[in-house]
Image: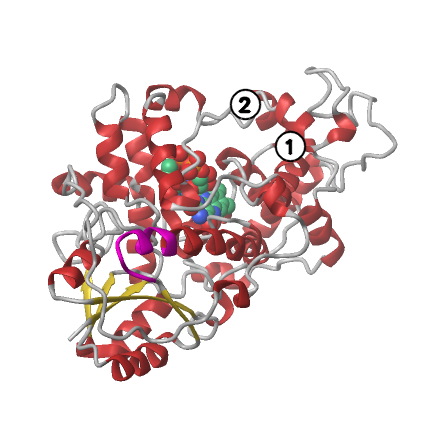
Amino acid sequence: APSLLWFRQDLRLADHPALVAAAAAGPVIPVYVLDDEGPGDWAIGGAQRWWLHGSLASLAKDLEALGSRLILRRGRSEAVLANLLEESGAERVHATKHGEPWWRAADAALGERIELHDGNHLAPLGSICTGGGKHYRIYGSFWKALQGSLPPEKPVPAPKKLTAPARWPKGDKLADWHLLPTKPDWASDFHGTPGEATAQNTVRAFAAKVGDYEAHRNLPAEEGTSGLSPHLHHGEVSPRAVWHAMAGHKDAEKFLRELAWRDFTDNLTLDLPDYADRNGRPAFDKMKWRKAPKELRAWQQGRTGYPIVDAGMRQLWQSGWMHNRVRMITASFLIKHLLIDWREGERWFWDTLVDADYGNNSVNWQWIAGSGVDANMWSRIMTPIGQSEKFAAADYIRRWVPELADLSDAHIHDPETNGVRPDNYPAPIIGHREARERALAAGRAIR
Ligand code: FAD
């Protein structure tokens, strides 16, 4: 009898233990299910649909080269798979372990019909715990504990051929899913190209410069980071393969330490599955967040009058990606300067990032807010202008905020105070000092 190979956020053929296991058991029916029900509010966002379209097209082609196909179905995962098992006479589903609450719910519903395999993490998901069996809350301690499981296992090669079932079940046409947006025309200016082949090329290209990562990773005007996040989120390359591609290179340590963050956030949300919706620190339930729809809109559209914030938000909207340093600055600005609930920003990122990821997004938003179970404090308020100067963001601002392109390096971070703000660029929506005092007072009120 054939087995089903259920692709989720592991859209690759290389280093895919579930695929290897399915292939060893006989004929394989590869399937992807577009499930907008199971995840509820966390159904795949707009930017990610664009990515998913390209990634599925690429995976289908790669499977065809192995004599196989990708069957596309739509609906509630567990119901779709149960039907498909019956229709095809398949005995079981092979799949990669995921931490997102909706995948775990589907796994539980499938019970003994699903066999889960490691492959999307450096160390098996859920295995890095304290002596007392508790999950880590602080990244530093997690990283230390992870050392015991490193290096990760060597990646397994892609199968050379897959045996087809006697009869292929029917599937949807990718084009009928309408994953590609009509507006904006992202493809023209988008971050990266979906697919396993591009993911592997990106890994190779970055390995050659991983030694420069530590010095350049905080500079938004440079391409100092790997650009791997959408590939990793969709599983077009495994973290173990990324690890082994970098580990032989000089000064790769800082990068590997960042790469391990995604293991940390998945383990944290495994322990606290509603982390994307609920404050890690209950005191934050009392926070008097402002309802300020106009200011939220200005932030989303990059019209706050703070050039570094506006550059970041426009990069996000136009390219589906934002530099990590600027994610921190824009998030801090929304939460502390505008005193708007971090969940509003988290949702916006969810819809606009090609790498929107349940663990990474929620843990980073709560970390910036200081509402999380990890260590950051509310009173740590980033100064957008100071950050912009410190991390030499002038060219980055010129690229994404063309109204300011003619300003000098000295003036561009703060056009208002320097008296050079063009008429077509907004004045700051709030003064830094005023915002800081308001935020500190709000923090004192919930202590
Ligand atoms: P690199 O610096 O080259 O890092 C390599 C990989 O390591 C990344 O692709 C990512 O998988 C992992 N990584 C690096 N830094 C982090 C981090 N701080 N947290 C978790 N993983 C990390 N990342 C996402 O993948 N999805 C998100 O939805 C997401 N939301 C974020 C929201 C906020 C408010 C902030 C501050 C950060 C968020 N990040 C998120 C983390 C980080 O900004 C991105 O992973 C990074 O910018 C991706 O670019 P890169 O692949 O070039 O990173």
Question: Between 215 and 206, which is closer to the camera in this rendering?
Answer: 206
Q: Position of residue 154 (x, y in %)?
A: 15, 40
Q: Residue at x 41, y 58 (%)?
A: 280
Q: Does the residue labelled 1 lie within 8 Å of ligand 1?
A: no
To which quarter of the image does residue 401 belong? top right
* Residue type at numbered disc 1: Ile
To which quarter of the image does residue 390 belong? top right
Q: Is mark 1 on a helix, strand or loop?
A: helix
Rendered view: 273 above or below 132: below
Q: Position of residue 264 (x, y in %)?
A: 30, 48
Q: Is mark 2 within 8 Å of ligand 1?
A: no
Rendered view: 264 above or below 56: above
* Residue type at numbered disc 2: Phe
Q: Which mark is residue 391?
A: 2
For residue 439: magenta?
A: no
Does residue 183 appear to the left or right of 319 in the view shown? right
* Ligand 1 falls in quadrant: top left
> Which badge, 2 or 1, is on the more N-terminal residue?
1
Q: Residues within 10 Å of mark 1 (few under 14, many from 20)?
A: many
Give the prevailing secondary structure in the magenta stretch.
Answer: helix
Question: Between 215 and 68, which is closer to the camera in this rendering?
Answer: 68
Residue 170 in view of the camera: yes
Residue 370 in view of the camera: no
For residue 63: magenta?
A: yes
Rendered view: 112 above or below 142: below
Does residue 211 appear to the left or right of 390 in the view shown? left
Q: What stretch is highlighted in magenta?
A: 60-69
How was the colour assigned to the protein in this rendering? Answer: secondary structure
Q: Residue 308 carries which label?
A: 1
